[in-house]
Image: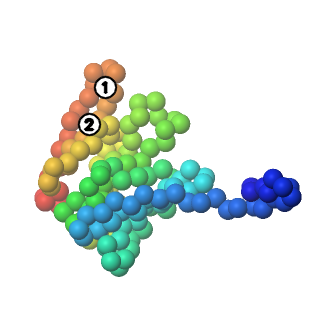
Amino acid sequence: MLQDMVTGRRVSVPPAVASQTTCSPAWCAQTSFTPDGSTRVEVVHPDGSGRVRLTSSGTTVPALPQVALLDRFEVLWQTDPTLDLTHNGQLLVFDLTTRRTVELSPDAATVGCAGSILWWSSGDATRAAVSWHSLDLRTI
């Protein structure tokens, strides 16, 4: 609500949608944060073509600063910070070729990558019960 302090007139202003865009030479990932707390993730070529919506609800965000690994895989992270005391989340990979999302882990913690190798930990670090996993995305 916007209020004119001189006249007292009040005007309803729709909430703005905040967004973040990160790009590689081939793809840009756009994450929009809606007023209700959900997110929408889309990828698009830098020239604006080829837009693909990856998510449209929930709290899913890109898991890595790199966009579309191998120009094919967008790595996503989904969690509910109000319910998860471990701060772990669901690790997902969206394949831009098949337009499918695949779960890699229901309980991922640290996520990283170098080249085509994606790695993540799972488990509870406070209990020294951590496992490490890796996947060479070229094998898919």
Residue 138 in percent (x, y) is at: 13, 59
Instruction: Identify whether 99 is placed above or below 79.
Output: below
Q: Quadrant of residue 119?
A: top left
Q: Nearer the viewer, residue 45 or 90?
A: 45
Instruction: Identify whether 98 is placed above or below 129.
Output: below
Is the C-beta separation of discs 1 and 2 under 8 Å? yes
* Residue that badge 1 annotates: 125
**Quadrant where the C terminus lies?**
bottom left
Residue 38 in percent (x, y) is at: 53, 53
| Amino acid type at mark 1 | Ala
Residue 123 in percent (x, y) is at: 31, 31
Left or right of residue 118, residue 100 in this image = right
Which residue is located at x 29 percent, y 38 percent? 110
Q: Secondary structure at mark 1?
A: helix
For the residue carrying disc 2, how many other residues have a C-alpha within 10 Å: few (<14), some (14-19), or many (20+)?
some
| Amino acid type at mark 2 | Ser
Q: Is residue 92 visible?
A: no
Residue 121: assigned label: 2
Which residue is located at x 78 percent, y 62 percent? 11
**How far apart, in angstroms, are the residues tagged by discs 1 and 2?**
9 Å
Left or right of residue 24, residue 4 in this image = right
Left or right of residue 38, residue 63 in this image = left
Which residue is located at x 25 percent, y 41 percent? 120
Q: Is residue 34 visible?
A: yes
Residue 99: assigned label: none
